[in-house]
Image (cartoon, helix red, strand yellow):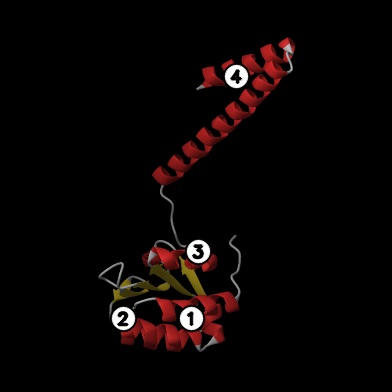
Amino acid sequence: MSVKIPVSAKKEFIRLLLEEGRFKREVIWIFNYILSHDKLVENVIFINESIQETDRGIYAADQRVETENFRYYKGDVSTTDSEKAFHDIRLNREETLYVQLKLTSIMQAKFFEVLEDNPHHKVSTRERRKIELTVSDLEKQNKKRLIDHYVNKALDERDEEAFHEWTAKYAELSKAE
């Protein structure tokens, strides 16, 4: 479960977008509209991936970063028509609105402060397996570092019994790989 981002933090970020970002006029228009309605801001969820998998969302890119800088998604339909997007947003203020942004590196740090999980993002079996393997490798590395620490400690303290115990554990862990 992700942390709920306060409306005040979202509003502050949207203001920053409007001040610092370079967006198409229509995108600015939509963000100004969102900013002027607290309930709409409350229902905005900033995400970092898979906007097309959401029920309803906006993809907007800073013009310095990408050429396609606006797309609106609703169900299986997408459009670059900002008037249709605005009309749908205006009529459905109570619905969750996902927003995925492509920003300059300077703006990216602020974006991470309001970023939430996308509950619609589907992790493939292949991606999940990659993650599991990575976590497993990290766990092994951490165990090795810990054992290595105790081996060094036994050497420093000239504790032969502890040294043999920890080197045996290290060898066992290395053999398991």
First in sequence, mark 3 or 2: give its number: 2
How far apart, in angstroms, are the residues tagged by discs 1 and 3? 15 Å
Residue 51 in picture, x, y percent from top left = 39, 66
Q: Which residue is mark 4?
A: 170
Residue at the image point whose x is 51% and y is 62% from the top: 117
Residue at the image point whose x is 44% and y is 59% from the top: 121
Q: Which residue is mark 1?
A: 15
The answer, for residue 136, to whether it is visible in the render is yes
Relative to the observer, which residue lies in front, 99 or 123? 99
Q: Is residue 131 left or right of residue 86?
A: right
Q: Is residue 158 left or right of residue 149?
A: right
Crowdedness near tag 4: few (<14), some (14–19) or many (≥20) residues, C-alpha within 10 Å: some
Relative to the observer, which residue lies in front, 120 or 113? 113
First in sequence, mark 1 or 4: give its number: 1
Q: Quadrant of residue 103?
A: bottom left
Q: Amino acid at mark 1?
A: Arg
The numbered dot on residue 24 is 2
Crowdedness near tag 1: few (<14), some (14–19) or many (≥20) residues, C-alpha within 10 Å: some
Residue at the image point whose x is 55% and y is 30% from the top: 140
Q: Which residue is mark 3?
A: 112
Q: Amino acid at mark 4?
A: Tyr
The answer to whether marks 2 and 4 mark residues whose Cβ atoms lie closer than 8 Å is no
Check the image and report above or below for 1 versus 25. above
Q: Amino acid at mark 2?
A: Lys
Q: Nearer the viewer, mark 1 or mark 4?
A: 1
The answer to whether marks 1 and 3 mark residues whose Cβ atoms lie closer than 8 Å is no
Q: Amino acid at mark 3?
A: Phe
First in sequence, mark 2 or 4: give its number: 2
How far apart, in angstroms, are the residues tagged by discs 3 and 2? 22 Å
Q: Is residue 96 left or right of residue 161?
A: left
Mark 3 secondary-structure assignment? helix
Residue 33 in picture, x, y percent from top left = 45, 88
